[in-house]
Amino acid sequence: MSTVPIVIDTIAGMREAVATERAAGRTIALTPTLGALHDGHLAHVARATELADVRVVSIFVNPTQFGASEDLDRYPRTLDADLAKLAAAGVDYVFAPSVAEMYPTGPTDTVVAAGKVGTLFEGTARPGHFDGVLTVVAKLLGIVTPDVATFGQKDAQQLFLVRRMVVDLDIPVRIEAIDTVREDDGLALSSRNRFLDPKERRAARTLSVALEAAASSADSGLDAALAAAQGALMGESLVKLDYLKVVHPRTFLPVDDDYRGPAIAIIAAQLGGTRLIDNEMIWLGN
């Protein structure tokens, strides 16, 4: 049976609700989102239901993680549709603050710095993005104080940085990674997929095909994996590749040519006005 979630738009109100739940001895799971929810987000809610008594979903389009030339104004805002989906999923609370509530005097002077890894890959294309992400995540964790928080494997670099932040800053929360949810043809679900026209949508599948090719050839080492992925991308003129790299899971830095073991193949590309990312765990060498 679906229940209508309680929507809270103030920090004080969210803290009061958390205090009430804590007093009743209930555990709390947080799923931070930017809204425009799809089945990938609902997979987070389903997992949160298994991990905690109370499910909180935050919906906040955080301006500090968008660059001056990025799509902040274009980012879809679909609160009513989001609430309907969360009601059907049995979410208990939705924390949906305004920008003024989260940043009453503008962007904070205190910022969580993402460090070197935060300047690579997505951080190169979107300078300052991960500082904005980590700062707002730290704020959300401080407001909701969850026992567990869910983050998607699709945003592998973000997941790595959030995990490192909670360790480095001794934040008492468990970070639960949620597997990437995909369309039937392999395309990773993303709120930005809606911006693809039909030709771009067909071409976008090439990203997951390239990752599958890398995984299939990884037994022969790094060069073979990258060559296979690049081969899968050849001939698809609508896909403007930004990067295709293989990184170590423990450092998120590129692996050496002779590395053998678990790794993550990561990819980003531009299709028209839409930027897409994806990744896949692979195993290099026999």
Image (cartoon, grey):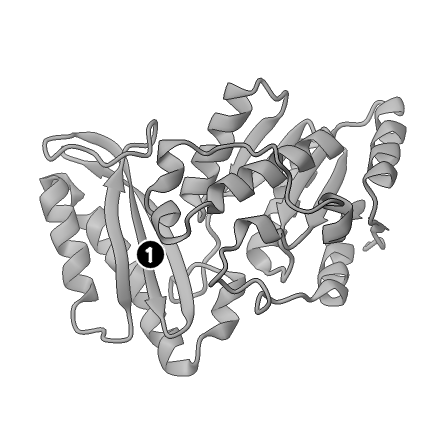
Residue most extreme to the bottom: 198
Quick one: SS at disc 1?
strand
Residue 213 visible? The answer is yes
Q: Residue 277 in the image: state x and y as whole percent.
A: 38, 56
Q: Residue 147 in the image: state x and y as whole percent.
A: 68, 26
In which quadrant of the rendered image does the N terminus lie?
bottom right
Q: Residue at x 52, y 65 (%)?
A: 71
Quick one: label 1, few (<14), some, or many (20+) residues within 10 Å? many
Q: Residue at x 19, y 56 (%)?
A: 229
Q: Residue at x 86, y 28 (%)?
A: 19
In which quadrant of the rendered image does the C terminus lie?
top left
Compare residues 97 and 47 and report the one nearer the observer: 97
Compare residues 89 and 224 and report the one nearer the observer: 224
Residue 96 visible? The answer is no
Q: Residue at x 57, y 34 (%)?
A: 111
Q: Residue 248 in the image: state x and y as whole percent.
A: 28, 32
Q: Amino acid at mark 1?
A: Ala
